[in-house]
Image: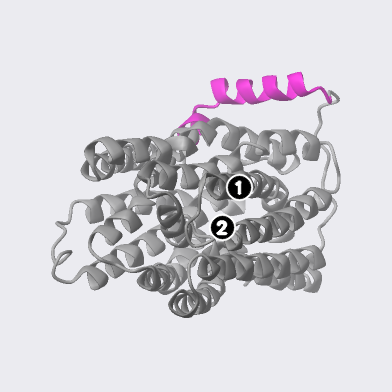
C-alpha cells in the first residue's frame, strides 16, 4: 500500500476486517447456494427460488436513491450505515427464527413468514450500500481501493470456507429445518461483528454538495439530467443492467444440481467451491483493478461467463458433484471480479462531493433488472433450465459490448 497517514492505514485495516466478517455472514445467506436450497426444500418451486434471489437483489438496490438523497446533504453518513447494518443483522436473525419454527413439513404460513422477513432483510440491507461506498472512498486512497476490496474478499473467502464447513456439518447432523436455521443464525452473528468493526473505523468529514436545493424533486431532476447528458454514465448503467440479467441464471445451478442427486449437505460443498474460486483469483483482481484499470476488469466477467456457458455439460451425469463444484468455483471467481470492478469504477466516476447521489442514481436505474431471477424462475417452470442459461449468455455478450465502450479511468487523475 502507498505511504499514507497512520489514521488512514488504521481505517483501511478496520474496514477490511468489517468486509471479511460481512463476506462470512453473506455466505451463510447466499442466494445461489444455501438460500436457494432452503427455498427449494420449503416450496419445491423454481419460481420461489428465483423470487428469493430477486428480492435480495432488488431490496439491496431500491432504497439507495432515497438514502442517497438524505445522505447527500449530511456531513456524516455513518448513522445511515449503522441503521442499515445493525438492522440487517437483526432481520437475518428473524429469518433464522422463522425457519426454525417452520417444522419439518412447512405450510403456507411458514413460507409466508420466511418471505416476509427475507424481504425486510433485503430492503434494510439496501440502506448500507450508499454510506458504505462513500465512507470507503473517503477513507482509502484511490490507488489502494482495489487492493482493499481484494483483501476483503480474500479474507472473507477464508471465513466463508469456514462457514461452508460449518454448514456442511450442520446439514449432516441437524434435521430440517433446524439445520438451515442454525446456518442463518451464524450468518446474523457474523454480520453483527462486521458492523461493529466498520463503526469502529469511523469516517472522515464529508464535503457538502454545492447545490443549495434540498428538495427531492430537484435531486431526481439532477439524476435525470446526468442520465440524459452523460453518455458515459449511461453506458455504465447499461453494463449494470446486463450484469443483473446474467445473474438471472445463478440461483438455478442449485436447482439443476438437485436434479442430478446433489444432497443438501453437498450444497455446502458447492458453497465452499464458490468461495474457493473467489479466494484463488482475488489477488489477480486486486492487482488488475489498481494497475490495469477498473474498466478492463469490467470486461473480464462477461467474457469468462460466455466461455463457461459455451462449455458442454460433460460429466454432469457421471460425475455430478465434481462438475457442479467446478461450476461454482468459476462463479465465485467471476462474481468477485465483477463486484470489485463495479464498486471501484463507480467510486472513480463519482465526484467526491456527490458520491452518495451518484450511487443512488446508478443503483436506482439498474434496480428493475434485479427482478430478472423471477423471470428466470418462470422460464424454468415453463420450459426448463436451457432457455435461462441461453438468455444469460446473450446478456453476458451485451455486457462485454457496453464495458468495452466505457472510458478508461485512471484513479490518479481523480480527486479523492
Crowding around mark 2 (Cα neighbors within 10 Å: few <14, some 14 to 19, many 20+) is: many
Residue 200 % position (x, y): 81, 68
- State whether the magenta stretch is mostly helix, strand or loop: helix
Residue 331 part of the magenta-drawn span = no
Image quarter in which the N terminus is found: bottom right
Looking at the rendering, which quadrant does residue 352 occupy? top right
Q: Is mark 1 in CB contact (under 8 Å) with mark 2?
A: yes
Q: Callout 2: helix, strand or loop?
A: loop
User: Residue 113 shows which numbered tag?
Assistant: 1
Q: Earlier in the sequence, mark 1 or mark 2?
A: 2
Residue 141 occupies quadrant: bottom right
Q: In whole angstroms, how far apart are the C-alphas of marks 1 and 2?
A: 9 Å
Q: Residue at x 83, y 36 (%)?
A: 73
Q: Which residues are magenta?
A: 214-236
Camera-nearest label, 1 or 2: 2
Is any part of residue 277 visible from this angle?
A: yes
Q: Is residue 406 visible?
A: no
| Residue 392 position (above or below residue 178) | above
Q: Quadrant of residue 8?
A: bottom right
Left or right of residue 322, residue 208 in this image: right
Q: Position of residue 241 (x, y in %)?
A: 44, 36
> Which residue shows up at 40% across the image and 67% down it?
274
Number of residues whose C-alpha sits closer than 10 Å to that of mark 1, classed few (under 14), some (14–19) or many (20 or more): some
Judging from the image, the colouring scheme is one colour
Identify whether 338 is placed above or below 22: above
Residue drawn 78% across and 37% down?
72
Percent position (x, y) of residue 410? 54, 50
Horizontal side of 204 relative to 173 (left or right) equals: right
Residue wearing tag 2: 102
Q: Is residue 220 magenta?
A: yes
Amino acid at each position: 500500500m502507498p505511504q499514507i497517514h497512520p489514521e488512514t492505514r488504521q481505517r483501511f485495516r478496520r474496514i477490511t476486517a468489517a468486509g471479511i466478517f460481512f463476506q462470512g455472514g453473506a455466505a451463510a445467506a447466499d442466494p445461489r447456494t444455501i438460500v436457494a436450497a432452503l427455498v427449494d426444500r420449503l416450496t419445491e418451486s423454481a419460481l420461489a427460488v428465483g423470487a428469493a434471489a430477486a428480492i435480495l437483489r432488488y431490496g439491496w438496490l431500491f432504497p439507495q436513491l432515497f438514502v442517497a438523497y438524505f445522505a447527500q446533504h449530511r456531513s456524516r453518513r455513518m448513522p445511515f450505515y449503522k441503521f442499515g447494518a445493525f438492522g440487517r443483522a437483526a432481520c437475518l436473525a428473524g429469518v433464522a427464527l422463522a425457519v426454525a419454527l417452520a417444522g419439518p413439513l412447512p405450510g403456507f404460513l411458514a413460507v409466508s413468514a420466511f418471505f416476509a422477513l427475507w424481504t425486510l432483510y433485503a430492503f434494510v440491507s439496501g440502506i448500507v450500500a450508499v454510506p458504505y461506498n462513500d465512507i470507503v472512498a473517503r477513507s482509502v486512497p484511490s490507488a489502494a481501493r482495489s487492493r482493499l476490496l481484494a483483501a476483503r474478499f480474500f479474507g472473507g473467502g477464508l471465513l466463508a470456507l469456514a462457514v461452508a464447513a460449518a454448514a456442511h456439518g450442520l446439514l449432516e447432523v441437524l434435521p430440517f429445518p433446524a439445520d438451515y436455521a442454525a446456518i442463518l443464525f451464524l450468518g446474523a452473528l457474523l454480520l453483527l461483528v462486521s458492523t461493529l468493526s466498520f463503526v469502529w473505523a469511523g469516517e472522515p468529514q464529508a464535503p457538502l454538495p454545492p447545490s443549495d436545493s434540498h428538495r427531492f424533486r430537484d435531486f431526481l431532476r439532477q439524476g435525470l439530467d446526468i442520465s440524459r447528458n452523460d453518455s458515459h454514465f449511461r453506458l455504465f448503467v447499461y453494463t449494470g443492467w446486463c450484469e443483473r440479467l446474467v445473474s438471472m441464471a445463478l440461483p438455478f445451478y442449485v436447482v439443476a444440481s438437485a436434479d442430478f442427486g446433489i444432497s443438501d449437505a453437498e450444497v455446502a460443498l458447492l458453497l465452499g467451491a464458490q468461495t474457493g474460486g473467489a479466494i484463488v483469483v482475488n489477488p489477480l483482481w486486486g492487482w488488475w483493478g489498481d494497475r490495469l484499470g477498473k474498466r478492463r476488469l469490467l470486461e473480464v466477467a462477461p467474457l469468462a461467463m460466455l466461455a463457461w456457458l459455451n462449455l458442454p455439460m460433460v460429466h454432469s451425469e457421471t460425475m455430478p458433484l465434481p462438475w457442479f463444484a467446478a461450476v461454482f468455483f468459476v462463479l465465485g471467481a467471476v462474481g468477485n471480479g465483477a463486484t470489485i470492478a463495479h464498486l471501484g469504477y463507480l467510486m472513480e466516476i463519482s465526484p467526491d462531493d456527490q458520491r452518495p447521489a451518484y450511487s443512488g442514481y446508478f443503483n436506482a436505474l439498474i434496480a428493475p433488472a434485479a427482478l430478472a431471477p423471477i423471470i428466470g424462475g418462470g422460464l424454468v417452470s415453463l420450459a426448463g433450465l436451457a432457455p435461462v442459461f441461453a438468455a444469460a449468455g446473450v446478456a453476458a455478450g451485451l455486457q462485454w459490448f457496453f464495458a468495452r465502450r466505457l472510458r478508461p479511468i485512471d484513479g490518479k487523475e481523480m480527486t479523492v
